[in-house]
Amino acid sequence: MWFDTHCHLDFPEFTSQQDKYCDLFNQNKIVRFFVPSVGPSNWQDVLGLASDTHSIGLGIHPCFLQPLIDNHTLDNDLERLGALVLENRDHISAIGECGLDKRIDTPISTQLSAFNVQIDLAEQLKLPLVIHSVQQHHNIRESLKGRQRDNLGVVHGFSGNYQQAKMLVDLGLKIGVGGVITWPTAQKTREAIAKLPLGSIVLETDAPDMRISGQQHHPNSPHFIPLIFNHLVELRPESSSIISEKIWENSIYLFSR
């Protein structure tokens, strides 16, 4: 059995072909999913997916901040997020997707401000964070220093080096391993994942994004988790059975509610 710890099942790629993807998930024994939101535009859609098999998170993704800034609604939307999470606490497993991204035009100061509000919310409710971090691992560390606790959260779709990964794991975060490790060119990340404690790793696809090597002409999907796992096994010293058992245990712990 497999748990995709980061997939956007509310996106049109999946909602428009539900029967097809349900069959693929069943065929490949993908039985648990974590679905994050990206902002106010899909909070209700993601809430509608909450179930015994679908854990969900509410948050504001850094790449979706700018329209809220342009419309002068960001502060109000962050307040709405807090109220919505409190109202639906029993159905929510995490705060996110939230975090920082160096590639976008939104000032890092604004990104940090929105991220810190979501960190405070997660801390208040003892929920894990689902963190998007692109070339901002140092700022993630600075934001979370002194907030270490059990099940702090996960940096999803990790693509850094071992020193960066260890820094995040030392804070109490898990590392989301996805399609990056399927690419031979991603040597620094493959080396990092090979060396990390097995207890710090979970598997994800970030579907429909983050294409898989050899499957890049197909939309990414949770049913590719076994392919990512096979690449993980190639990198690790443990047996495949030990890895699969521990990955499942890590994932259930991360998104327990």
Image (cartoon, grey):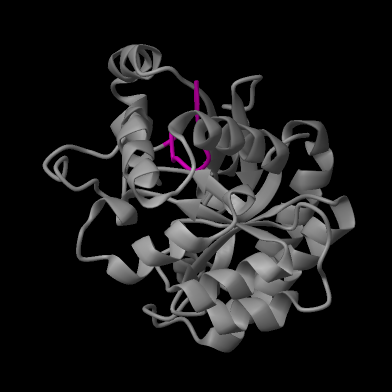
Among the 4 quarters of the image, the one containing residue 11: top left
Residue 112 sits above or below residue 165 on the image: below
Where's residue 132, x and y in %?
51, 63
* Viewer can see residue 58: yes
In this view of the protein, which residue sits in the foreground, 210 or 202?
Answer: 202
Where's residue 54, x and y in %?
58, 27
The residue located at (39%, 78%) in the rendering is 104
Q: Residue furthest right?
A: 124
Q: Is residue 141 left or right of residue 227?
A: right
Where's residue 193, x and y in %?
45, 59
The prevailing secondary structure element of the residues shown in magenta is loop
Residue 201 sits above or below residue 112 on the image: above
In this view of the protein, which residue sits in the foreground, 122 or 82?
Answer: 122
Where's residue 253, x and y in %?
72, 38
* Viewer can see residue 45: no
Among the 4 quarters of the image, the one containing residue 174: bottom right
The residue located at (61%, 53%) in the rendering is 200
Residue 227 in magenta stretch: no
In this view of the protein, which residue sits in the foreground, 241 or 54?
Answer: 241
Q: Residue furthest left?
A: 217
The residue located at (16%, 40%) in the rendering is 215
Quarter of the image for the C terminus: give it.
top right
Q: Is residue 252 left or right of residue 9?
A: right
The residue located at (38%, 42%) in the rendering is 233
Q: Is residue 26 left or right of residue 146?
A: left
For the magenta stretch, what is the residue range? Answer: 1-10
* Number of numbered discs overlaid on the protein picture: 0
